[in-house]
Image (cartoon, rainbow, N blue to C red):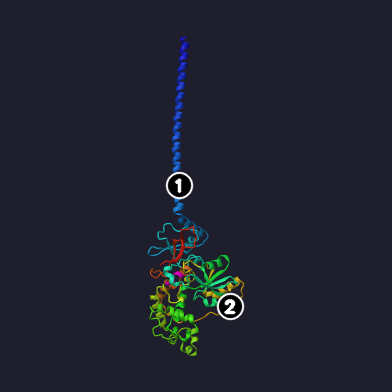
Amino acid sequence: MINTMNTNGKSNRNKSLTNASNNNSAGSMVRDSATNTFWLGHRAVLGCLVIGTFAISLSNLIIGHRDYYLSSVYQREHYSLGLPTFQRITEINGETIYDGEYISRILHGELPFPLNNNLQRLKFRPGSLPLSSAQSLQKCYVNLTRYGNQIPDKTVMLASVSDTHKLIYRNIPKSSSSTARHAMKDYFDGNDRRMRHNELELAVYQLNYSLVSFVRDPLNRFYSSFDESFFRLGPWMGDSPLVQNKPAVRKSYFQNKYKVDKYPYLYEGLPTIGHFREVYCPPDELKLSPMACNNVPSIENGTLAHRFEQFVRDYDGSDPFDVHMHLQVSNLVWGVTGNPLPVTKLYNSTEADKGWLDIAREKGVHIPDGELTHGRRITRRFNVSKVSDATKRKICRLMALDYCCLNFELPEVCRTADEDEAVYCALDKIPKRDGYNNDALYELVVQQWSI
């Protein structure tokens, strides 16, 4: 029995040891499971932190640096196509000059306005936008405080209108306007009409009328504008036979004469039209007929050109003394708001005949060959060759708004690195103007850099 009891005791002890061992194994498994759960939890947290950090970094990349990203994409696309990428040219003073293609993509919403630009302005060169003059005009901003005296019509727009051909022509003095008036009257059944803002927009946007005009290189136009204005505001326009049958011209003279009084040197020694003609007209032609002087080159030796240069030095562009001196852009905006007219197309006046033939073809009108030469072809009276480069550069600065808003390239003489004489354009971010997208707080506009 004792053996049996010993055997049973050993068996029980073995069972106890086995149970204890099993219990220890189970406890170890529990402890291992808890440890694994702990580390798995930490790994999950770490994973979330990594993913969260990555997401935040990605968001910053997209939100904070998307202009850089999109600009890089733009460069890669152009590089792969073999096209020139946009360039940023840093001038001596550290300012950045943006390429016109880059500016255009921002205007069209393809690239964002740089977020790191505290001044809300981007600088670019006139004529560098890949846009037509009409497209560039629609982005133009005219500061009415500065240019209010330049706008001839405040609440209405004087235009030549053809209801037959759904064509509206907006006149700009000294930009092939004589040819245009002839074409509208003789071939398009046009008549002068004063149109209000809502009437014009109804015609263009809903009734499918075309609104066209002609524009011209601002420097060359300024020469012609001054020449015409000088003639119209001369002292001979008061009571001379020249204006006996031109009451409107005479009225304009008396209304604006005070504006030239601040430039007394202009007409010094030229009290009559005869004295004026003797300065620029060859004697033989003058004896033959005074009107013949308009068809031959000027012989003036710099007398008139010197006065012209003095005028340019004194003139700030804010208050022109004749309508012919107004900016071209001022004829293409509303006087109340400064917003651009809904222009369909702007033609270059250097190819006026071709422009009118294109318009005629589009409207189904036939114009015989050689019938668009009825415009006045008057030789310029002062000698432009006597005008200095410094004066030409001053004119380009005076005409900067035309160069920028009509997207004209600067003439070679005005392309200078001298910061005091250089002409640049600005892409500005300004509060939304009346009549534009009501959902937007700001809009992007083009104007001259120096205001």
Marks 1 and 2: in contact by CB < 8 Å? no
Camera-nearest label, 2 or 1: 2
User: In this view of the protein, which residue sits in the foreground, 107 or 275?
Assistant: 275
Q: Which residue has dot 1 on it?
A: 54
Identify the mark at residue 107; answer none if there is no mark.
none
Three-letter code for the amino acid on which mark 1 is drawn? Phe
Magenta-colored segment: predominant secondary structure: helix
Which residue is located at x 50 percent, y 86 percent? 291
- Is residue 114 inside the magenta stretch? no
Residue 438: image location, x then y, percent = 49, 59
Three-letter code for the amino acid on which mark 2 is drawn? Asp
Residue 289: image location, x then y, percent = 49, 88
Q: In the rendered structure, which segment of residues is drawn in magenta?
A: 398-402
Q: Residues within 10 Å of mark 1 (few under 14, many from 20)?
A: few
Which residue is located at x 47 percent, y 19 percent? 15
Lateral position of residue 356 relative to residue 20, left or right: right
State the separation of the CA atoms marked 2 and 1.
71 Å
**SS of the residue under disc 1:** helix
Residue 302 appears anywhere in the view: no
Q: How many marks?
A: 2
Residue 424: image location, x then y, percent = 43, 67
Residue 250 appears anywhere in the view: yes
Residue 188: image location, x then y, percent = 59, 74
Identify the mark at residue 186; answer none if there is no mark.
2
User: In this view of the protein, which residue sits in the foreground, 307 or 210?
Assistant: 210
Q: Against 425, is 180 above or below?
A: below
